[in-house]
Amino acid sequence: MTRIAIVVLTLVAGVLACLATALLSPWWAFAAVPFVLLGLLGAWDLLQRRHAVLRNYPVLGHARFLMERIRPELQQYFIERNYDGRPFDRDVRSIVYERAKGTDAEEPYGTERDVYQPGYEFLVPSMAPRPVPKSPPRVRIGGPDCARPYDMALLNVSAMSFGSLSANAVLALNGGAAAGNFAHDTGEGGLSEYHLRPGGDLVWEIGTGYFGCRTDQGDFDAAEFADKAAHDHVKCVSLKLSQGAKPGIGGVLPGAKVNAEIARVRDVPQGRTVVSPPYHRVFSTPRELVRFIARMRELSGGKPAGFKLCVGSRRQFLAVCKAMLEEGTAPDFIVVDGAEGGTGAAPLEFADHVGTPLTEGLLTVHNALVGAGLRDRIRIGASGKIATGTDLVKRMVQGADYGNAARAMMFAVGCIQAQRCHTNTCPTGVTTQDPRRARALDVRDKAPRVQRFQEATVASALQIMASLGVTDPAQLRPHMLRRRIDPVTERSYEELYEWLAPGQLLAEPPASWAADWNAADPDRFTV
């Protein structure tokens, strides 16, 4: 019997059953309704031309799409082990949840990880541990050209825009930052009332779209920037060159998502698609970049100014270092974003294969600044999968002064890693503009969770540092972090990577850096 015949017979049987039972009792007619609906569905499956599976397997073929839809949930809850999930495994998610709730985050019975697996990393404890500091140290952001330096916490909220996040999520993150005295990066989506209302310290980030300080033609509006940067809650200003999720490409905000509120925050027309180009209009050379950072600092009234990037060409970054030296000015901070990605949706090819991972990115920026004699005036922030105290200490060993967390902060406000961030259907109200879904996120409950998570994670980092024999991040050294190469070999970061001496590039560049240093041009971005 053909598939068409089966569908037709089902439909006919349903109709006849409806008629027959209706003559006897109208109530029994409802029993035939499912047969009628299945018959109609099968007929539609046979007639539609979009899905071959449904044409060959009417009705039954829908099971395939259902299983595909719930595959991430099945994988996360029933298949993956505690330590092998991606992007964040169950162990990491659990420790964030526990710390955010203020409950015990300890585990019994030893590690489940294979400590002899190549790539396993561990920190080296001291035979003479130090007492844990009573209060966390802070990082002074502000070089010689900065009139209003800022003391940055060791862990802060990384860049996530209003529009990508719901209003309630932004309120909870900033409320937590205000309670815990740490910074909240606005992301490139503009400076909204939700960033300002709770009173947390802000790093105002400007992207290629110049949202919030944008002319009608899409250029940078200096007057509007100066006006908003003067706000007391804005402690630093940052220029985003690229992000780890999609370095080298811009973004598109569909007109359907540009409601009146988002249009007002971003200085764009309501209902019209907005394009963020992959490049900046305010500079085209390394020298112009350095000059523009200095202009941002001046327009903000002397507040710390810096930039964020996912590292690509080492030669281009060295060109920026040369521009700093020749111009006699430098950014106050640089945030290094890892190619491990983040909260932003991106093409799979970019997420998987474009950009430098955070470890190598940090090492490149740190060594370039040290070798150029600039490291003492520029602070480095690390952004990329920082969720635990171990993550934070590792990044500081690799050259960072402080860390920023995005997805871990999302976990703290209720994210369950459903990976629906770009669909406007976030089940926990974190990454959606749907009022009904966003309402599920209770700001009064989630803001304290953000504060508790940050506090506990920094406390964990300090405890780890004390076990290494240090009390301040500046005392961390590359030999304190080791990586297993094979089952019988492990090496320290001091042995695995090259570490430049202060001013070494200016005096006599090592052979491994000489070609890039000599080719770096402060007046053009050499490919």
Image (cartoon, rainbow, N blue to C red):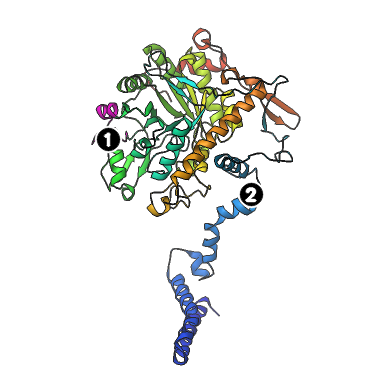
Q: Would residue 10 be found to the left or right of residue 266 on screen? A: right
Name the spot of residue 476 as percent of width and height, x first: 60, 20
Q: What residue would you read off at disc 1?
A: 218
- Residue 260 is at least partly visible in this image: yes
User: Residue 223 in magenta?
Assistant: yes
What amino acid is at disc 1? Gly
Q: Would residue 521 be found to the left or right of residue 231 on screen? A: right
> Label 1's element?
loop
Q: Is residue 295 above or below residue 120?
A: above
Q: What residue would you read off at disc 2?
A: 80
Q: In the rendered image, which quarter contains the C terminus?
A: top left
Q: Which mark is on residue 315? A: none
User: Residue 190 in magenta?
Assistant: no
Q: Is residue 349 above or below residue 486?
A: below
Nearest to viewer (mark 1 / mark 2): 2
Quarter holding residue 142: top left
> In the image, which residues are magenta?
210-227
Magenta highlight: main SS:
loop
Q: Would residue 296 be found to the left or right of residue 518 on screen? A: left
Q: Residue at image x 51%, y 46%? A: 415
Name the spot of residue 519 as percent of width and height, x first: 45, 17
